[in-house]
């Protein structure tokens, strides 16, 4: 069964021609850094990446990477609450929230991104 | 622990921003990730061994990072340049080196 699954599965790697290049944020890190400096850089890089995805609405992964949809949940008006868009957006917002808490812990002067709102409970 | 300037290249590649702790919990998903890494990294030279720290027994040290030790520094360098900026599960991959002694001692 494991063999069958392996055949069906696609690699998580993106194609070679879709490389990301953000000016000022190198992805090959060859400058000498301590582990703490590297972790801090990583944190900021990921925050930048999440911010960009949320701003451009690019957060629904391609079909092959999607997880199995959970049972639908409806609100009192019969409107579905846990839509695919909602779920993926929420996942990124939750991750961003954790990363910002971590960044503040490392540096109390850290300023969260302007569009950052603390995650709230279920809404539509 | 060099001062400012460039890092000393080693034969151990460090891959960052590839996985979240949650993705490493289930054995099946972990094995898939391991296989994806092994397969792609083998394109740049002979891979000696791989370490993917998992969140077990409250361990958080190095979780989220992936380490690939090559037979040569040249292979690690080729992988470092080729994989930087690639996507892995829609996340942008960052690459770096790590001291081999630290890698061996699980000091990440």
Image (spheres, rainbow, N blue to C red):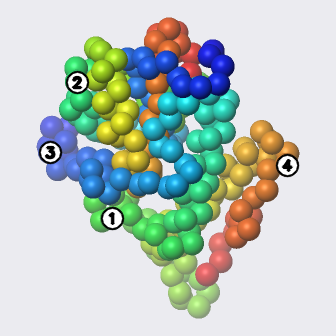
What is the chain identity of the residue bearing mark 4?
A: A
Decide if residue A51 is in sight here: yes
User: Given the image, what chain letter belongs to the residue carrying mark 2?
Assistant: B
Where does the C terminus of chain A fall, quadrant-wise? bottom right
For marks 1 and 4, give the CA distance. Answer: 37 Å
On the same chain, marks 4 and 3? The answer is yes
Disc 1 + disc 3, Cβ < 8 Å:
no
Residue that protrudes farthest toward the front in the picture: B5
Question: Is disc 4 in contact with disc 3, using a CB cutoff of under 8 Å?
Answer: no
Are the residues under marks 3 and 2 on the same chain?
no
Q: Secondary structure at mark 2?
A: loop
Tell me how far mark 3 sits from mark 2, CA to CA. 24 Å
Residue at mark 4 to residue at mark 2: CA–CA distance: 44 Å
Residue appearing at x 45%, y 38% in the figure: A28
Q: Quadrant of residue A32?
A: top right
Where is residue B33 shown, x and y percent of the image? 34, 38
User: Where B28 sits versus A88, above or below?
Assistant: above
- The residue that label 3 is drawn on is A7
The label number, if any, that marks residue A109 in the structure image: 4
Instruction: Count neighbours of disc 3 (C-alpha within 10 A) and say few if under 14, some if 14 to 19, many if 20 or more.
Output: few
Q: Which residue is identified by label 1?
A: A62
Tell which of B86 and B65 is nearer to you. Answer: B86
For the residues beneath circles 2 and 1, the answer to whether they share a chain is: no
Residue at x 50% of width, y 30% of height: A30
């Amino acid at each position: 069964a494991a063999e069958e699954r392996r055949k069906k599965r696609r690699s998580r790697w993106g194609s070679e021609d879709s490389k990301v290049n953000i000016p000022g944020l190198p992805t090959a890190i060859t400058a000498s850094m301590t582990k703490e400096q590297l972790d801090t850089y990583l944190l900021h890089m990921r925050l930048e990446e999440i911010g960009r995805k949320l701003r451009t609405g690019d957060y629904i992964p391609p079909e092959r990477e999607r997880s199995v949809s959970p049972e639908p949940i409806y609100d009192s008006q019969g409107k579905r609450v846990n839509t695919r868009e909602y779920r993926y957006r929420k996942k990124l917002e939750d991750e961003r929230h954790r990363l910002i808490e971590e960044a503040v812990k490392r540096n109390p002067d850290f300023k969260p991104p302007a569009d950052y709102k603390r995650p709230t409970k279920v809404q539509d | 622990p060099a001062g400012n300037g460039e890092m000393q290249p080693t034969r151990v590649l460090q891959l960052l921003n590839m996985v979240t702790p949650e993705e490493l919990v289930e054995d099946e998903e972990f094995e898939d990730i391991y296989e994806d890494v092994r397969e792609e990294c083998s394109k740049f030279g002979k891979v000696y061994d791989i370490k993917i720290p998992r969140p077990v027994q409250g361990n958080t040290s190095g979780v989220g990072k992936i380490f690939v030790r090559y037979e040569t520094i040249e292979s690690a360098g080729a992988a470092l340049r080729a994989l930087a900026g690639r996507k892995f599960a829609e996340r942008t991959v960052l690459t770096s080196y790590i001291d081999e002694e630290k890698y061996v001692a699980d000091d990440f």
